[in-house]
Amino acid sequence: MLFNTLIHAILLITLLGKTLQTFFLFLISIVLSTPSLVSAEMNSGDTAWILTSSSLVLFMTLPGLALFYAGLVQSKNVVSVLCQHFGIACLMSIIWVIAGYSLAFSQGGSALIGDLSKLFLKIPIDSEVGSIPELLFAMFQMTFCIITPALVIGAYVERIKFSVALIFSSLWLILVYCPVAYWVWGGGFLAEMGVKDFAGGLVVHTTAGLAALVIALVLGKRNSFKKDNLSPPHSPVLTMIGASMLWVGWFGFNGGSALAADSTASQAILVTHIAASLGAFSWIIIEWIRFGKPSLVGMATGMVAGLATITPASGFVGVQGALILGLAGGILCYIVVDLIRIKMKIDDSLDVFAVHGVGGMLGTILCASLMQNSFGGTGLDDGITVLNQFKVQTYAVIVTALWTIILSYVILKLISMFTDLRVTEDDEIEGLDNSLHGESGYNN
């Protein structure tokens, strides 16, 4: 009896095993015969790196840039600066998803602007850019479209209406940022000419810096600036913390622009760090010689100058190029800060043009020479001389500058037809935290 039971159990297990084997083979055949949603060319390592880079670049704005700027203003305006960053980050994300990405990166448009074929990110799930999903590429580029108008905040802090900041940033994103992004990265006429802008010397820093200069001129000076009664930064500590976040986030900004976890990304991160270090050090050496004391704010500002200068060239230059760009960026940006603020008396409050605009344009132009193999760079394209590349880079800077200046001015004048750009004098004296937001950054 027991023997028969064992025999039946063995037969049952054998039959069940064959049935399961057949079932699993059937499932495997279905999987193999079904078109894959993920292409064999898609690389999980590259995808993971750009997922990380997207987070790092968003981290640059929230909270990095927000804290960097917040520490530089008066304590009565710290909340307003944080609100501007937070509001712009949210609103730019919405606009980018609706139309911005399509205008900047769809391929069916003219040489000047993309079409509307990708409105609301109408992208097939299996669409790719290089070895990563296109949806991820759109997300990565969204973080760039967030930080660029956020950089401009530094030009108008402590005196602009919050509503005007949001309206200007929205129109500026569509009319300035998206076209320039298309020209350089989306297959537009500058890309066809062979311009080199690895991570945003033109698209991000030149546009933001020149828009900042325009809005500073149109808005006019802060009352405290007019009276030579500017308060020092209320919290160099916040500024240093924000600058440190920018530094770390910039590895995703420049390294992620390789769109792959490869040697180009590795080189971009290395040269980014070198340029930032030399930019900071060159800035404080000047301060040390000039004033006898190196400042924390100066060190942080020099670091940002070095980062802005290396950005367009980060995927093309080597260590020698990074040393030159970091040094040149730190020195030239320092000189232009003095020129704009002291000599010309322009209230670009947090030196956006002098640091980002000048740094971005300088790095874009010098890239033509420093990308040569003799400087440790990746080398020029076949058949292209240094002079030819220099002409292309310079032409791209001029075109981007003119477009940004004209459109930024037009946008501001258009807005001013419907509302005042500035808060009232009483609100400015009281501080924007309470007058616009009903909050205070520091409650005793």
Image: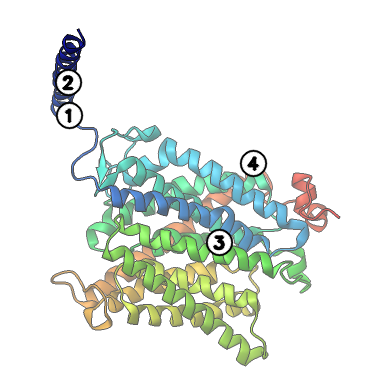
Q: Residue at x 43, y 35 (%)?
A: 98
Q: Which residue is mark 1?
A: 35
Image marks 3 and 4: residues in contact by CB distance under 8 Å:
no
Residue 314 point in image, percent of width and height? 35, 69
| Label whose residue precedes the other's in the sequence (3 or 4) | 3
Disc 2, SS: helix
Q: CA distance from mark 2 to mark 4?
A: 78 Å
Q: CA distance from mark 3 to mark 1?
A: 50 Å
Single out the mark in the foreground, 3 or 2: 2
Q: Residues within 10 Å of mark 3 (few under 14, many from 20)?
A: many
Indicate which disc residue 418 carries.
4
Compared with 425, 92 (above or below) is above
Q: Residue extending furthest right?
A: 444
Q: Which residue is mark 2?
A: 17
Task: Check the picture and name the quadrant holding the C terminus.
Answer: bottom right
Indicate which disc residue 212 carries.
3
Q: Quadrant of residue 196?
A: bottom left
